[in-house]
Image (tube, rainbow, N blue to C red):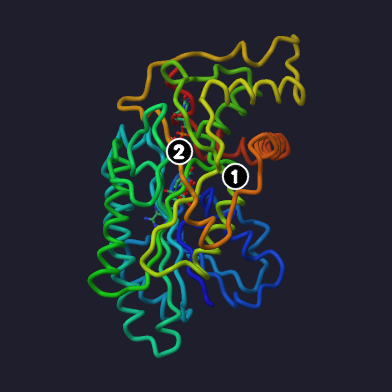
Amino acid sequence: MNLLVTGGCGFIGSNFVRQRLAGSDPLLPKLVNLDKLTYAGNPANLADCTHDPRYVFVQGDIGDPALVARLLAEHAIDAIVNFAAETHVDRSIDSPEPFVQTNVVGTLRLLNGARQHWTKLPEPRKSAFRFLHVSTDEVYGTLAPDGAPWNENCPYEPNSPYAASKAASDHLIRAFRHTYGLPTLTTNCSNNYGPYQFPEKLIPLVTLNALDGKPLPVYGDGGQIRDWLYVEDHCTAIWLVLQRGRLGETYNIGGLSEKRNLELVKTICALLDRKAPRADGSPHAALITFVQDRPGHDRRYAIDCAKIQRELGWAPRESFATGLEKTVDWYLAHLPWCREITEQRYAGERLGTKV
Ligand code: NAD
Ligand code: TYD
């Protein structure tokens, strides 16, 4: 199938593109990556893929109907995987509008383009066409400490502007399936971690600040819980859902690794004490600084991924201990990639500036 990936220069998208292009997959003649290259999109994330004859990069907006229509027709697209989004909760609190523009309006326009393209496809390509929308567990709101992890039937209760915009996009996907019959799939995953994550998110932020001897900002009491999913496990799950997921269905994808933020930050500090000890011998954990909490901060996220396990045989393969160590090692080995972002592309912007 010829695949259109949106947001492929971001964190999860670039891992997905790399995973798909690894080896010579006969199922993948062409992979087109449509990315607007916002602050979070970085072509360097896919520098090792640009030579691949199957890979086409196009800078542009999912909300540009003419461009989307042209790409779908010109590259005879058979499936779309929509990663493109504004993704950082703190930015959505500071400025919600770009989140509605890309996550809601952009997704609507991409759906419209997909529908027009799909309607005109001849069989059997029409029946085989897929639109997979990548979403988040944050649409479900927040869990009590003893609450059962979210399954696909849980009600939507988004709390941040980011979560609300993703919830709206999920509803549009559902409506396009129900109203027009567009062959859609939705995945709702927990917090991802791994290589190429933009250093405004907790794990890379803490790792890089620690290496620089800067404060490690922990919001509130650090007792919030996230369910950490290694990005490669997530990408494998998306590919499985794309190939074998039941049309119109939602699949929750989680890492089965619930951790409190403070515990996670301390684990990163301990890893760095071993791998990159500080010159004065003091522990990295001495840099932990409790800062003002995020407004409306969700206390706990956790995913019940029994459905994708049962139907598609997927389970996370990476343990949190091994995944986190691999991730820290990756950042240590890719400091020029990090510095390019923190010192040039992202200079002067929020990177732990709340301290
Ligand atoms: P990211 O912020 O790292 O990357 C987003 C990418 O989308 C960037 O390359 C950016 O340039 C591109 N983009 C933004 N607006 C665009 C537009 N209008 N048109 C085209 N491209 C545009 O995000 P990520 O962490 O890789 O997340 C990818 C998807 O997964 C998002 O939809 C997000 O909601 C979802 N998700 C992420 C996580 C996580 O932990 N990272 C968890 C759950 C769900
Ligand atoms: P983040 O990586 O922003 O993901 P999300 O908000 O989508 O879960 O944050 C993960 C958790 O870490 C979340 O509970 C907020 C917290 N956090 C901090 O304590 N300090 C920080 O500097 C950041 C960026 C996040």
In the displayed structure image, the side of residue 8 where residue 106 appears, left or right: left
Q: Which residue: 33% across, 44% down?
A: 139
Q: Which residue: 54% across, 77% down?
A: 1
Q: In the rendering, at what x and y percent does residue 148 appear?
A: 41, 37
In the displayed structure image, the side of residue 343 where residue 48 appears, left or right: right
In the rendering, which numbered label is found on residue 230? 1
Q: In the rendering, at what x and y percent does residue 283 appear?
A: 69, 12
- The answer to whether the residue bearing label 1 lies less than 8 angstroms from the nearest atom of ligand 1 is no
| Amino acid tagged 1 | Tyr
The residues bearing labels 2 and 1 have C-alpha atoms spaced at a distance of 14 Å
Q: Mark 1: which secondary structure?
A: strand
Q: Earlier in the sequence, mark 2 or mark 1?
A: 1
| Amino acid tagged 2 | Ala
Q: Which residue: 64% across, 64% down?
A: 50
Which residue bears the numbered disc 2? 302
Q: Which residue is at the front of the view, 141 or 51?
A: 141
